[in-house]
Amino acid sequence: MLFGKKSVGLKTVDFDHLPQHIAIIMDGNGRWAKRRHIPRSGGHAAGAETFRNIATYAKEIGLRYLTVYAFSTENWKRPKDEVDAIMRLLHNYLEEALRDMEKNQIHMAFFGDLTPLDPELRALCEKVESTSRKYVQCNVHICLNYGGRDEIMHAARSFAADCTAGKKRPEELTEALFDSYLYTKGVPDPDLIIRPSGEQRLSNFLLWQAAYAEFYFTDVCWPDFKKEHLLNAIRAYQLRQRRFGGT
Ligand code: FPP
């Protein structure tokens, strides 16, 4: 864990006041691969490596929550070989995470509807989640078959079902109660959302939770995203004034 203010190049990051929760849209793998004349799956493989490094570094600096967008509800539209390659990378990563769990000490969990996944991958997700639950200091969430609208609809349906069953009444619904029906239940909203690759949109990511998030965009594609890019984003965040609708 890092403490105090540290200079990164000419810039200073205050490690005592890190954002509690950083969420990242891991974008630009395809363009990174295209520039190198390699298949898109090569870009995703490089992206998976970046994720490993950033998750390890997040733990090292004492970040409490890191969430990454790995596969959206819309990504099924991609060619089958690309979808298969991403699922394989996830599978390999999770096997590795199980093996290295004691060394890494990271709680890993998933946001999204895992039911359409291959049963073996789903079982692996469940095993990683349950066996890493004891590591509460650093929590890494992977959004998998995740969509913000899908999440909100799923929550609305579950609440409606509880009303029909007589367990809840419509008039008791508050933001806090609605939160408890989301995939992200119990996890604080992201303070900072980072999107690399030059794109500046949310793409159905954490729609409800992003209400007061700060945004950071960089032109660097995800496979080229390094510790210093994360620190640049944190530093930019630390220079912002968050008012949450107040003055
Ligand atoms: C977006 O870039 C990236 C994805 C849809 C997949 C992300 C998956 C990984 C990084 C690998 C597996 C993840 C883990 C956590 C091990 P894009 O393909 O849309 O890039 P482009 O916009 O340049 O085409």
Image (spheres, rainbow, N blue to C red):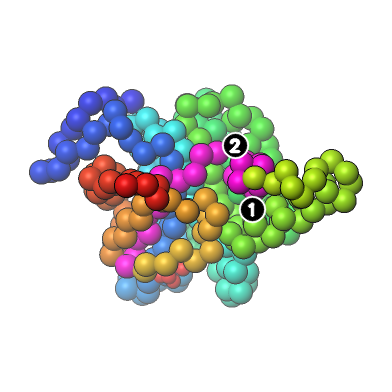
- What residue lies at 61% left-to-right and 41% top-to-bottom? 176
Report the front residue among 239 and 235: 239
Amino acid at circle 1: Gly
- The answer to whether 73 is drawn above or below residue 191 in the figure is below
Question: Relative to 165, does residue 13 appear above or below in the rendering?
Answer: above
Identify residue for label 2. Answer: 186
**Residue 6 on image: x %, y %:** 18, 32
Q: How many marks?
A: 2
The type of residue carrying mark 2 is: Gly
For the residue pair 52 and 37, the one nearer the viewer reads as 52
Furthest residue toward left: 10
The disc placed on residue 86 is none
* Image point (77%, 50%), residue name: 170
| SS majority, magenta | loop
Q: Position of residue 140 (x, y in %)?
A: 50, 40
Cβ atoms under marks 1 and 2 closer than 8 Å:
no
Residue in the picture at 36% in, 39% down? 19
Can residue 150 be seen at all in this image of the molecule?
A: yes
Residue at (62% x, 62% y) in the render = 149
Q: Which residues are magenta?
A: 175-198
Q: Is mark 2 within 8 Å of ligand 1?
A: no
In the drawing, does residue 114 fall left or right of residue 33?
right
Q: Which residue is mark 1?
A: 112
Q: Is residue 38 above or below residue 137?
A: below
Position in image of residue 127 (x %, y %): 68, 37
Residue 172, relative to residue 100: is it above or below? below
Q: Is residue 180 magenta?
A: yes
